[in-house]
């Protein structure tokens, strides 16, 4: 399956999930019955999704992500994902604007102005080098440059937000630096003589 096909499948799941979410159980069942009949799907496709039978892991990951559909404010996402760095918070802002904000406000790219605005709304400390933040986030591999001063969250950034945050607390452990080894600097060689 190509990346484009996976993206289309995830988008279809997201659309169906968003459409079903406000409905009661009986309405959800009627909708699913219609979809199953309309597309000649097997009757084993049931509305009861837990426990999930042998579905591809990406679909299970998406269903876990669908809990994000309850989030309507950047502060909620920040509190849930607990970013530890300004770069992680920038990725949250980009994800929020592209996937969780109200439809009329959604956008696929972010600028320094967006970062400043949403950091303030979320109650997250502004970095001292705000103008460099998105460039640094791009260099870290989370964003792609799409225009002058405009950045788009890429797959690595998406995975950071959806699958790898929060870090440390039961999630992926924080990377710890190893102490530097003394490689025999001039001072240490001089002392050993």
Image (cartoon, helix red, strand yellow):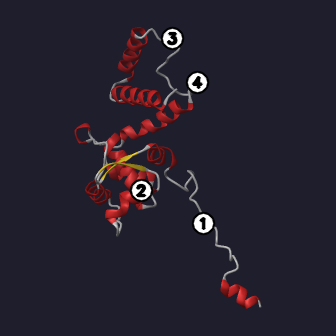
Q: Which mark is residue 156?
A: none
Q: Which callout, 1 or 4, points at the residue further toward the start of the chain?
A: 4
For label 4, the crowd category at 10 Å Cα-Cα, with few meaning under 14, some 14 to 19 and many 20 or more, is: few
Q: Is residue 47 visible?
A: yes
Q: Which callout, 2 or 4, points at the residue further toward the start of the chain?
A: 4
Estimate the spatial distance between the alpha carbons at disc 2 and disc 4, rounded to whole Å.
Answer: 38 Å
The residue that disc 2 covers is 137
Q: Is residue 56 above or below residue 190?
A: above
Give the residue at x 52% y 54%: 167
Estimate the spatial distance between the alpha carbons at disc 1 and disc 2, rounded to whole Å.
Answer: 20 Å
The residue that disc 1 covers is 177
The residue that disc 3 covers is 42
Give the residue at x 27% y 54%: 114
The residue that disc 4 covers is 53
Q: Is residue 134 above or below residue 104?
A: below
Give the residue at x 24% y 42%: 105
């Amino acid at each position: 399956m190509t990346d484009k096909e996976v993206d289309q499948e995830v988008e279809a799941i997201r659309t169906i999930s968003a459409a079903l979410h406000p409905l009661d159980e009986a309405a959800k069942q009627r909708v699913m019955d219609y979809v199953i009949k309309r597309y000649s799907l097997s009757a084993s496709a049931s509305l009861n999704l837990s426990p999930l039978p042998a579905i591809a892991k990406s679909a299970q990951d998406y269903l876990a992500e669908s809990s994000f559909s309850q989030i309507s404010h950047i502060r909620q996402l920040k509190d849930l994902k607990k970013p530890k760095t300004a770069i992680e918070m920038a990725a949250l802002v980009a994800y929020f604007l592209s996937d969780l904000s109200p439809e009329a406000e959604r956008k696929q790219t972010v600028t320094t102005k967006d970062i400043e605005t949403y950091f303030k709304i979320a109650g997250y400390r502004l970095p001292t080098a705000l103008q460099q933040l998105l460039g640094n986030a791009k260099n870290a591999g989370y964003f792609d440059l799409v225009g002058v001063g405009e950045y788009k969250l890429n797959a690595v950034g998406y995975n950071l937000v959806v699958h790898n945050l929060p870090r440390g607390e039961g999630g992926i452990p924080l990377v710890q630096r190893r102490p530097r080894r003394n490689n025999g600097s001039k001072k240490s060689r001089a002392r050993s003589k």
